[in-house]
Image (tube, rainbow, N blue to C red):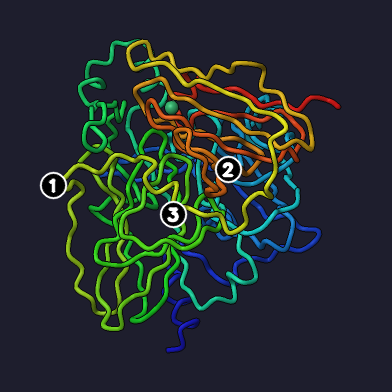
Amino acid sequence: MHRRTFLKAALAAAPFALRPAAFAQDQSAPTQLDAVSRYLDVNGKSARVFGLEGPGHTSGLELDASKPFDVALTNRTGEETLVHWHGLTPPPELDGVPSEPAPLMRQGETRRYSFPLRGGGTHWMHAHTLQEQNLLAAPLIVRTAEDRAADVQEVVVLLHDFSFTPATALLARLTSGASGGMHGGMGHMSHGSGGAAQDVNDIEFDAYLANDRTLGDPQTTRVENGGRIRLRLINGATATAFTIDTGGLDGRLIAVDGQDVQPIKGRRFPVAMGQRLDIMFDIPPEGGAFPLLALREGGLERTGIILATAGARIEKIAATGRAKGPLVGLDLEPGLKAVRPLATRTPDRRLAVTLSGGMHGYDWSLEASKPLRVRSGERVEVTMRNMSMMTHPMHLHGHHFQIVSINGKRIAGAMRDTVIVPHMAEVAFAFDADNPGKWAFHCHHLYHMAAGMMDFIEYERA
Ligand SMILES: [Cu+2]
């Protein structure tokens, strides 16, 4: 069978797979997106969760980079909500942080979101509320003409950490300090030889999902012998960092946070909350079954999908491994080189923030040494110093930034929108202030954000 025909047939059944002919955007009609309530079976038990359904009830959206973002979002969740387009650069009134500035949407309300796209990329969208815990989150894939012309099978995977306990109760337990069970689950790990111990994982989840499924019943994606695969992986977990383990398959990392990097070969790639990885694989001509696993940082738990050629024997994979997942650190970061970096320029403004707080008071904060104000047209450099015992994945809305310094060492790193700052580390990023507004800047650990690790970078009027 010709590869394209084969792919269409094979992918039709996979809810998260990209279907090449799926977009039908035109100038006048927006793409419909519904925020919904649905039931999901997790480990044999039914859970009410949310979803974001695009055309044909597929999860999420796939858009054409040559056209504007033009989406009509309808709230069918039965409660108030709002959606943030993580990785895109909308004007501030379309960003999606409740009341900053747009109010929450009422049940049944439809809002239209229209703004230019700035290129392709693996992005996602999610509620900027505790509803993110209940899967008010989905892939948002923007494909270029080059992506569409490539003879590559795309596989989109959204990772998640799932709990049967409501997010409000999880947060209340953490902030009340009366979380015996939660502290019991918390890990302490050392990084490298002689590194100080750090805290990892402040919540024990009931399951770790890849495209809504556990390894008890994983997504198995049919691939071709000798075929080329592009994994578009999104860490949509609220409080869990993962290491992607490609098993016996060599991967080539080609983008982080939807921004192209010079390819890096490997079999293990870290991905913190909010971040994305695009990894290319060549399936061997002899075929086989190839699990792509996501190892929970500091834990035995894992999730993932399986790529399999026709007739391949697929072995059952346990949802817990024998070795704890590695700490997600900055080892890979200095080696990442942006394909399209910022132009070389001296910063016009330097900002500095300190990340602090701890598990006991659950008093996470982001403190700036001076007001986080910028002016349109400036090159801004932001230095983040983490004085706490946990790693924080820091996300700035409305912009893409470049990593320019790690622990005082200058680098010309990747373009990103989310970067981790490990405990006692210092990371700096630079961005061009080209999208006036008031922009959320926060930790992408949902409960750290909810407990106060969030601020705004605001443009001054000239
Ligand atoms: Cu944090």
- Which numbered tag is attached to residue 86? 2
Front-lying residue, 233 or 139: 233
Q: Earlier in the sequence, mark 3 or mark 1?
A: 3
Q: Earlier in the sequence, mark 2 or mark 3?
A: 2
70 above or below 5? Answer: above
- Which numbered tag is attached to residue 68? none
Q: Check disc 3 and report the residue beneath it.
A: 233
The kind of secondary structure element at disc 2 is strand
Q: Quadrant of ligand 1?
A: top left
Q: Give x and y (percent) for residue 448.
A: 44, 23
Asked if ligand 1 lies within 8 A of label 1, the reply is: no
Q: In the displayed structure, does residue 409 sit left or right of residue 360?
A: right
Measure the alpha-carbon separation of dots 2 and 3.
14 Å
Q: In the displayed structure, does residue 25 sit left or right of residue 324?
A: right
Q: What type is the residue that disc 1 sits on?
A: Arg
What residue is rendered at 66% in x and 27% in y?
457
What residue is rendered at 63% in x and 66% in y?
144
What residue is rendered at 51% in x and 28% in y?
384
- Which numbered tag is attached to residue 322? 1
What residue is rendered at 43% in x and 34% in y?
133
Q: What type is the residue that disc 3 sits on?
A: Leu
Q: Give x and y (percent) for residue 140.
A: 56, 52
Q: Residue furthest left?
A: 322
Measure the alpha-carbon separation of dots 3 and 1.
24 Å
- Based on the displayed image, in which of its 4 quarters is residue 390 positioned? top left
159 above or below 148? Answer: above
The kind of secondary structure element at disc 3 is strand
Q: Residue furthest right?
A: 462
Q: Earlier in the sequence, mark 2 or mark 1?
A: 2
Q: Give x and y (percent) for residue 334.
A: 45, 47
1 above or below 167? Answer: below
- Based on the displayed image, in which of its 4 quarters is residue 142 positioned? bottom right
